Every structure is written in structure tokens, then in C-alpha cells.
Image: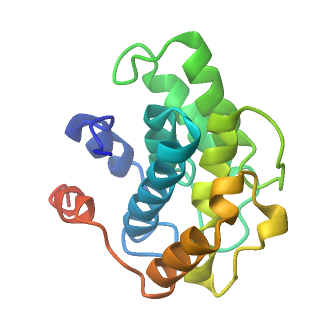
Amino acid sequence: MQNTYISNKLIKTILSGYKLPWDGIHGITHWARVIENGFRIAEQNGADPEIVALFAVFHDCRRQNESRDNGHGKKGADFAYTLKGNLLTLSDYKFDLLYYACSHHTEGETKGDITVRTCWDSDRLDLYRVDIKADPDKLCTEEAKNPEILAWAEKRAKDRFAPKIVDLWKKFT
């Protein structure tokens, strides 16, 4: 699945207000792995790949630090709201999914819409980047609990694998 959901103008706008190091643990390499994790799950469960991709770039985009940052997901969702109708041309329904996924991604929820759950799992599968193994009991989708997906995502997170899109995004520095 190809990422055609995030325009250069959108990512440039998001990155212009990102306060942390782009290569930090919550930066663009993490976002890119979250996209790929989510696409892999969405291919199997029918989640909306557009929302998955947008979640990846908004969920941590307004963090103020690399450790505990209460409310950062809602700040990312609120920032997305400021772009609605301009750089984000989502239906109200789709935007509500994005907003909810971003706002609640750190609360440990596991129930709800398949697209929202896919967003949360796409992020949780990248926890190994901070030496936390993804706990299948805290994942929301059967696809993310698949041992092959878990091993694939864990290796990429542990190795801090940088998907190709990162090279494009770095051009905005």
C-alpha cells in the first residue's frame, strides 16, 4: 500500500511546528514506521489507510518532550482541526475518527472502530524503540497480535529502521 495521503505541504506544515529532534524517539522515523505498521494491518482488516497515515503524523506532532507528555495526543488532534478544510479535506466522519485516535492513543483502550484500533496498534507496535515489547494483551486487533507482524515490527523498531519516506521528509529541514 502506497502512502498518497500525506502531501508535501501537509508534512512541511506539521514539521514547521514540531519542537523535538526530528530523529528523536517520537520523531519522523517513528511516524514513518507507524504508517507502515498501520498499512500492514489495514491491508488485512480493512481499516481506512488514509486515517492510519494521518494518525501517524499527527499523534505525536505536538509533543513538548520525549518523556511523559500528558495531553500531547489531543494537542496533535487539535492541530489537525486547525487544518481541516484546508490541508485536510476529510469528511466529518473520517475527521472524527482521526481526532479520537490521536486524542486517546495513550489511554490503553482496545475497543471501538477498526480504523481507530488499527491506528493505536500501529503506534504500539513501535514501542520497542524505547525498549518496551508490545504486549499482545494490550493490542486491539488480531492482525497486530500475529506473531509474524509482532516480530517484523519489533525488529524494525529495535533497529530504528528508517522507511524511505523519511528521506523525503528530511528535505524539509
Residue 149 percent coordinates (x, y): 55, 68
Residue under the point 35% across and 17% down: 86
Q: Nearer the viewer, residue 122 or 82?
A: 122
Residue under the point 71% across and 50% down: 105
12 sits to left or right of 73 = left
Q: Up-down: is 68 above or below 35?
A: below
Q: Up-down: is 152 above or below 80?
A: below
**Quarter where residue 96 is shown:** top right
Residue 82 percent coordinates (x, y): 49, 24
Q: Nearer the viewer, residue 10 or 153?
A: 153
**Quarter where residue 121 is shown:** bottom right
122 sits to left or right of 5 = right
Q: In the rendered view, how is the structure colored?
A: rainbow
Q: Up-down: is 133 above or below 149?
A: below
Instruction: Name the image quarter holding the C terminus.
Output: bottom left
Residue 118 percent coordinates (x, y): 62, 46
Residue 43 percent coordinates (x, y): 47, 44
